[in-house]
Amino acid sequence: MFKQFKGQKGFTLIELMIVVAIIGILAAIAIPNFLQYQMKSRQAEAKTNLGAIRTSLTAFQAERGCYVAVLGWPGNVPALNAKSAPFPWSVPAPVAGGIVNYCVGGGTFTTPAGASFLDVGFVATGSVLYHYGTFPAAAAVVPPVLACGGAGFNNSATVLAAPGGGAGTDVGFYAFAEANLDADGAISHWGASNDNGAADCTVGSF
């Protein structure tokens, strides 16, 4: 019933092993590069949202006369050796601070000490990997000219405890985004200021 084809040969074991070895080498080269590319693409979130936050704060200053501190949001403060997970921006929804006053020379917003992103008109779409916040620069310091130049910029606790929050004499602001995308011992920080768009403050860290 079955006819044997003359001259038909299969692959030898050596040939199969060589093919498997080549595939393994290609995978060893391609997979790390793919993972790094994937991490870089996730950083686009910080760059895009910081640009929108900068626009919102600039518009707020144009209307109200000062820059205001925005408390860190959402509740996904990154930790060392732990991967940041997507966090819904509006669950729970950030509560507006109820700012009704305009800035005057020497005056400050007293309610609240720090605003929310709703107060400055910024809302992110969907879930985010990064934790965001801003803090103003008082007249006693040099106006922000670097996106990553804020004092204590790489320490969330220091940033969120920074003085200010609506003084009529505030001359600028820093905005930050931070996450740990690869669960290592370093936090990735991005920054922006009134004079600069988004910049990677910890190049090479994810």
Image (cartoon, rainbow, N blue to C red):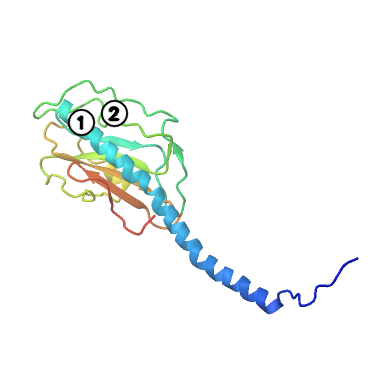
x and y percentages locating residue 111 in the rendered image: 24, 25
Q: Secondary structure at mark 1?
A: helix
On-image quarter of the N terminus: bottom right
Which amino acid is tagged 2? Answer: Gly
Q: Count how many numbered circles sit on residues in the image.
A: 2
Residue at x 17% of width, y 31% of height: 61
User: Is there CB contact under 8 Å for labels 2 and 1?
Assistant: yes
Q: Which residue is mark 2?
A: 121
Specify few, some or many for label 2: CA neighbours under 10 Å numbering under 14, 14-19, or 20 or more. some
Residue at x 57% of width, y 69% of height: 24
x and y percentages locating residue 39 in the rendered image: 42, 53
> Which of the two residues, 109 or 73, is positioned nearer the viewer here?
73
> Which of the two residues, 31 or 8, is positioned nearer the viewer here?
8
Which amino acid is tagged 1? Answer: Ala
Where residue 70 sits, quadrant-wise, is top left
Residue at x 9% of width, y 30% of height: 106
Compared across the picture, whether 81 is left or right of 58 comes to: right
> Which of the two residues, 34 or 191, is positioned nearer the viewer here?
34
Give whichever of discs 2 and 1 has the lower sequence position: 1
Farthest residue, direction right: 1
x and y percentages locating residue 203 in the rendered image: 32, 58
Specify few, some or many for label 1: CA neighbours under 10 Å numbering under 14, 14-19, or 20 or more. some
x and y percentages locating residue 182 in the rendered image: 45, 54
Q: Which residue is mark 1?
A: 59
User: Distance between the Cα atoms at labels 2 and 1?
Assistant: 9 Å
Residue at x 32% of width, y 50% of height: 189
Q: Secondary structure at mark 2?
A: loop
On-image quarter of the C terminus: bottom left
Where residue 90 sits, quadrant-wise, is top left
Q: Which mark is residue 128?
A: none
Compared across the picture, whether 146 is left or right of 129 comes to: left
Where residue 139 sits, quadrant-wise, is top left
